[in-house]
Image (cartoon, rainbow, N blue to C red):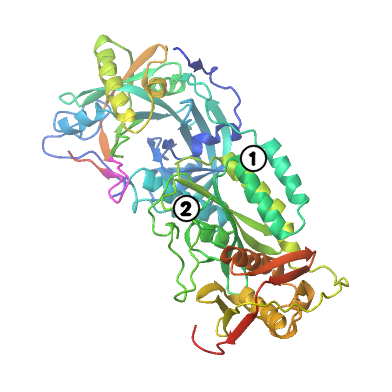
Amino acid sequence: MSETGAVAPATATSATATSTTVAHGGPLTPDVAAFLQSAVSILVAAGGADGLPVMARAIACDPDSAAGEIRLLLRTADAAALLAAIAHCSPVAAMFSRPSTNRTLQVKASSAVVEPSDAALLGCHRQYFAGMAAELAGLGFDARFISCVVSDNGSTLAAIRLAVAQVFDQTPGPAAGSVKTG
Amino acid sequence: MTGMTNLPPTGRPVGLEAIRPCLEGVIPVGIATIAADGTPNVTYLSQVHYVDSAHVALSYQFFNKTRRNLLANGRALLQLIDPVTAATYRIAVAHERTETEGPLFESMRAKLAGIASHTGMDGVFRLLGADICRVVAIEAVPGDSLPERRATIDFLPPLRSLAQMLARAGDLSDALERLTAGLHERLGFTHTAVLLHDPGNDTLYTVASRGYESSGIGAELPMGAGVIGTAARARTAIRITHMTSDVAYARLSGGESVPATLGQAIPMPGLADPGSQLAVPIEDACGLLGILFAESPTDLAFTYDHEDALAVLAAQLAPIVRRGMADAPDLPEAQPRPVRPGGRPIDIRYFRANDSVFIGDDYLIKGVAGAIFWILAQAFANEGRSAFSNRELRVHPALHLPAYSENLEARLHLLERRLAEKAAGIALERTGRGRFRLVVDRPLRLVDMACAPA
C-alpha cells in the first residue's frame, strides 16, 4: 500500500490524526515507541518558508506512548533552518532507520513545538549514543566517526515535541510506504 | 574533540566534485520532499549518482511518496555523510528529467546491484529510472568531522607519465604491455585486463591482462555479460565498490568461462571473490573498441578518481587500437631464405568449421586469429616462408576480411601472446610496423580437419 491517501488508523479507541495529542491506541504503539528509541538513524524534515524542504539529524528520541507524543533532540548548530520552519508551524516528518536491518519507520505530525532540552532527553541521548556506537561499530565504523555523527558536537541542543499522527513502514521492499497500524 | 575539525558555518560554497565520496553508496542518503499540501516526507535513497559538476541522478526504484513529491514540485533536499570524514552535507536539487535507459541508467543499475548486495537488499532494489537533478546549492553542515585520511593518490603525474608512454608505444602489443605495467606500478591497480570488441560476432576478447594466475589471453565474453559486458553494451563506465551477488553482474571468473565448444574455452582472467570492479569503455567517434577493466579483492578499492584515471587512459588507448585497423604501407623487405628446420615435427590440427587450431592436443586459438595462423603455418610448411606483412593478410582470399574494419593488429597480438604462453616451439615476432615473422624451430605437420566437427 502506498502512502497516498494514508490516514491515521481509525479504530474505536483511537483518535484521528490531529495536531494535538493522539490518545493511547493510536499509531505510537509500545512496539513503535521502542523502535523509535532504539539504535536508529533519525532524520527530521519540515517545509521552509519558501516551501522548500529543510532537514536535520536528531540525536535522541523520547517517546511517550500514553500521550501519543515523541520528543526529538536536535543540535541547534545544524538544525537552525528546521527549527525555524517548525516555529512557523510547518508539518513535520521524522524517519527512523536501523542501519543493520534497514527497518525504517516514518512518523508524521501536523506540527511540532520547539522546547528546551532537559535532563530526561539528555539521558535518552546517553542511551542512544551507546546504542548507536554498538550498532555502527558492528558495521565497521570506528568510534571517532560514530561520535561525529551522533554526539552533540559541542552544539547547544533543543527539543521538538510532536503528536504522532501517522506512522509509515518504510523498510525497503514491497510494503514500503504502508501505514503502520500497530 | 581531539583529532576532529569543525566545519565552518552553513553557507560555505562546496563543489560537487569535492564531495563525491559521499556518493559511493556506503552510507544511505537522506532525502526530504514536500507534498502539494505542504506535508514533508523524509526517507533514505539507495543511490545518488554523480553525473557532472552541476548534476546528480537519484535512483528511482519505487513510485513512492518521495518520487510523487519530486515530480509534483520538482525540488528535494539531500543529506549526505562522507564515509571517511563523517562530514555532513546538504544538497538542494531541482528535478530536470528521468532516464529509463542508456549509459547513465546502465551505470546506475550496475552500481545499485553492488549497493543492494552490500546492504542486504539483493532482489529488493531494482532501478526503474534515473532522475536527473540540477544541483541548486550545496551546504557544508556545521559539526565535527575527522581529518581527511583517505589514501590519496595524486593522479595527474602518473597519468602524464602513462599518457607519454602510450604515445611512444610502437604498436598495440607494446601499448598494452606499457599500459598494464603502468597501471600496476604507477597507479596501484593490482588486477587489470584489456578486452577488444569483435564487431563480427559482437563479442569481446581478452588481449592483455596483469595480476592473474592465468592470463586469459584469448578468452571471450559476450556483450552484456557481467560488469565488462554491460559496460561494453551500454558504452559507459561501470564501477562497483562492493561485490554483488546479482546474477546479472556476477562475473565469469576464477576458472569459469563463457560457454564454448568443449576443449576450446579459455578461462576469463578474474578474481574468484572480487570486492571492487571497474570497467571503462575504449571508444572513439566510430564506435566501441574495447574495455579497460580493473578489479580488486577489497571493497571500496576504486573511487571516482580511479574511474576518471582509467577513462583518460582508455581515451589514450583508443587511437592506438584504431590504428591497428589500418596497415602501414607495404615496405619492401627482403624475404629471408626458406627455413627448413629439422627434428620431430609439431602437429598442427586445423578445424575449418570455426577456424580453431590445436598444437598437438592443446587448443591454441580460433576465429580470425586461428585462420591467420593456418595461413602462416601453410606458407611455412609448404614454402619455407617465415616473413609476412599485415597487408598481405588483409587481402588474403582465405581470410575474407572486410577492408578496414577488422583489427588485424589486435588479432596478431592475440596470436603472438597465445603462442608465447604455449611455448610449443612456435613464435610470432614483430619485425617492423605492419611486418612480422613466424619463428619455428621444428618442422610443422599440418592436418586439415576440413569440415570435421570441432
Where is residue A101? Give x, y as percent. Answer: 28, 39
Frontmost residue, B132 versus B347: B347
Q: Which residue is mark 1?
A: B186
Q: Are marks 1 and 2 on the same chain?
A: yes
Dividing the picture into quadrants, the one containing residue B187 is top right
Q: Position of residue B401 (x, y in %)?
A: 70, 79
Mark 1 vs 2, N-terminal side: 2
Cβ atoms under marks 1 and 2 closer than 8 Å:
no
User: For this view, does A133 lie left or right of residue A54?
Assistant: left
> Would you say residue A41 is visible in this rendering?
no
Q: CA distance from mark 1 to mark 2?
A: 28 Å
Any mark on residue B110, and which?
2
Numbered circle sitting on residue B235: none
Residue A36 point in image, percent of width and height: 25, 29
Residue A177 part of the magenta-drawn span:
yes
- In percent of the image, x 75 and y 64: which residue is there? B430
- Can residue B160 be seen in this snapshot? yes
Span shown in magenta:
A169-178
Residue A24 drawn above or below residue B311: above
Q: Nearer the viewer, residue B341 or B406?
A: B341
* Residue type indicated by callout 2: Ala
